[in-house]
Image (cartoon, helix red, strand yellow):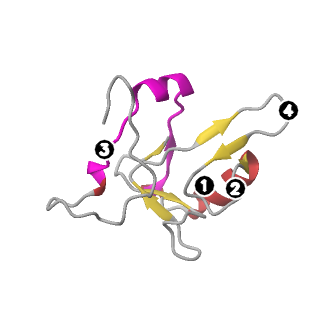
Amino acid sequence: LPIYDKRMVPIWKQRAGCGDEPGVWDYHVILLHVSSDDQNFIFDLDTMLPFPCPFDIYTEEAFKSDAYINPDFRRKIRVVRADAYLKTFASDRSHMKRPNGEWQKPPPPYPCIETAEIGR
């Protein structure tokens, strides 16, 4: 989970971006598939890069070097094991709405993330 203290995470090659500009997220969930082969892959539902994308290409193209990023927007990465994520992570997308209840931007077309234990 790329996260940032001020809830603004720049990630390039995103559908939410504009041209060469990054998409800016309050957090963003991606899957790292660690393979028994030499190549690991990133699964990102919002990327414009190949799906799945080889890890080295994704990190270079989507994360960019910290040298290109204002220090105020440098990312932190939180690694969550898949079993813990599937058991405990849920989102009702309320963080994507303005105080009046309107969407800041249209929500993704796929359903909210729910778990059997937590629900929304």
Image x and y of residue 80, in percent: 52, 29
Task: Return the disc, 2 or 3, that comes first in the chain's sequence.
Answer: 2
Question: Which residue in the structure is indicated by mark 3?
Answer: 92
- Report the Cα–Cα distance between label 2 and label 3: 31 Å
Q: Position of residue 95 (x, y in %)?
A: 28, 50
Which residue appears farthest toward the bottom when viewing the image?
19
Of circles 4 and 2, the one toward us is 4
Q: Residue furthest right?
A: 38
Name which residue lies at 55% across and 57% down: 46
In this picture, is 42 found above or below 78?
below
- Residue 85 within the magenta-colored segment of the rendering: yes
State the extent of the magenta-drawn residues as a range: 73-95
Depicted 83 relative to depicted 74: above or below: above
Residue 48: name its quadrant.
Answer: bottom right
**Could one spot residue 81 in this view of the protein?**
no
Does dot 4 land on a helix, a strand or a loop? loop
The 10 Å Cα crowd at callout 3, few under 14, some 14 to 19, many 20 or more, is: few
Q: In front: mark 4 or mark 1?
A: 4
Question: How many numbered marks, from 0 up?
Answer: 4
Q: Report the residue that reaches farthest toward the left.
A: 100
- The disc, 4 or 1, on the residue closer to the chain's N-terminal end is 4
Query: Residue 37's mark?
Result: 4
Give the residue number, with chain letter if any, for mark 1: 63
Mark 2, residue position: 60
* Amino acid under disc 2: Glu
